């Protein structure tokens, strides 16, 4: 029987190494099955005894992926980004990670037209990562060069699917003006990794417009049905962007999302009856 494998990312607690251990502890104790953080956080632990692996080991939870943003705007000037991602990727590989989640650089005022050339850079990252056993996947994000549905289409139609997959973020896609469920349906065979967050429909939420799963406008049941249809074998990582104005503690928000998903998925989730 098909089973969903569901984890939680760390950004609900914060974006730096300082919040990471509390995030790992809460995620594990709630019964989520994996944790995800930034490549930079992993490297920040490099000089600590046991590195980030020691934190994961203390709470008995694995890493699902490493999140690796790029900054390049001109594809011809991307080598520094490629080298940085390779440093993060090698550190993540030592923690058992199999997927590198790639974010594009930031938007500027002028229209961007270099998606074919960007795709070649992403292919090169994918090629280098594949040499030491990792797969890469593109993550759409508001405020970046891959935000709208047209931009998602442009880059996914240009990359080599043997090197680069799709790592949709349901809330980011919805906030970027597209229908998240429809986007995942269109590219369902390319999906490698998922960030699952809800979106408040434009209202202020204390989470940069996002919501715990089941509290917003994203069609979560349809998305999960699409993943089930293709027998998705990767990680579904619950996520909610934490801010100082968040209306509840991070652990409470993560528990809300888990309760909704447990009710929706029943015994289709491997975490059934685990955690609080």
Image (spheres, rainbow, N blue to C red):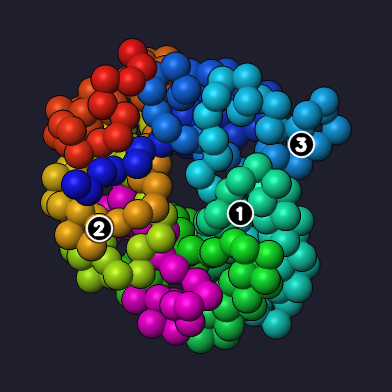
User: CA–CA distance between discs 2 and 1?
Assistant: 26 Å
Nearer the observer, disc 2 or disc 3? Answer: 2
- Report if residue 154 lies within the magenta region: yes
Q: Secondary structure at mark 2?
A: loop
User: CA–CA distance between discs 2 and 3?
Assistant: 36 Å
User: How crowded is the residue under tag 3: few (<14 C-alpha within 10 Å), some, or many (20+)?
Assistant: some
Q: Secondary structure at mark 3?
A: helix
Answer with the quarter of the image where residue 256 lies.
Answer: top left
- Quadrant of the image containing the C terminus: top left
- Report if residue 268 lies within the magenta region: no
Does 88 sit left or right of 106 as displayed? Answer: right
User: How crowded is the residue under tag 2: few (<14 C-alpha within 10 Å), some, or many (20+)?
Assistant: some
What residue is disc 1 on? 68
Residue at the spot 35% in from the left edge and 38% down from the top edge: 6
Query: Picture coordinates of residue 42 (x, y %)?
Result: 70, 40
Does 70 sit left or right of 103 as displayed? Answer: right
Does 228 sit left or right of 37 as displayed? Answer: left
What residue is disc 2 on? 231
What residue is disc 3 on? 44
Does 140 sit left or right of 133 as displayed? Answer: left
């Amino acid at each position: 029987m098909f089973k969903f494998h569901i984890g939680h990312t760390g950004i609900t607690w914060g974006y730096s190494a300082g919040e990471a251990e509390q995030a790992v502890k809460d995620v594990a104790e709630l019964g989520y099955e994996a944790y995800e953080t930034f490549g930079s956080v992993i490297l920040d632990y490099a000089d600590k005894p046991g590195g980030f692996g020691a934190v994961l080991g203390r709470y008995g939870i694995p890493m699902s992926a490493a999140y690796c943003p790029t900054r390049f705007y001109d594809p011809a000037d991307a080598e520094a980004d490629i080298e940085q991602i390779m440093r993060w990727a090698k550190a993540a590989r030592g923690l058992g990670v199999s997927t590198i989640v790639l974010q594009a650089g930031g938007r500027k005022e002028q229209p961007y037209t270099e998606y074919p050339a960007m795709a070649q850079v992403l292919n090169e990252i994918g090629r280098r990562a594949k040499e030491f056993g990792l797969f890469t996947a593109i993550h759409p994000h508001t405020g970046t060069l891959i935000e709208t549905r047209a931009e998602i289409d442009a880059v996914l139609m240009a990359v080599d699917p043997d090197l680069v997959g799709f790592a949709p973020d349901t809330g980011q896609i919805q906030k970027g003006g597209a229908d998240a469920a429809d986007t995942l349906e269109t590219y369902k065979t390319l999906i490698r990794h998922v960030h699952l967050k809800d979106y408040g429909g434009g209202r202020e939420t204390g989470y940069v417009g996002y919501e715990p799963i089941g509290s917003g406008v994203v069609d979560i049941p349809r998305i999960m049905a699409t993943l089930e249809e293709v027998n998705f074998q990767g990680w579904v990582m619950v996520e909610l962007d934490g801010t100082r104005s968040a209306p509840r503690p991070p652990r409470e928000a993560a528990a809300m999302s888990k309760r909704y998903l447990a009710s929706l998925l029943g015994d289709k989730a491997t975490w059934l009856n685990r955690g609080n």
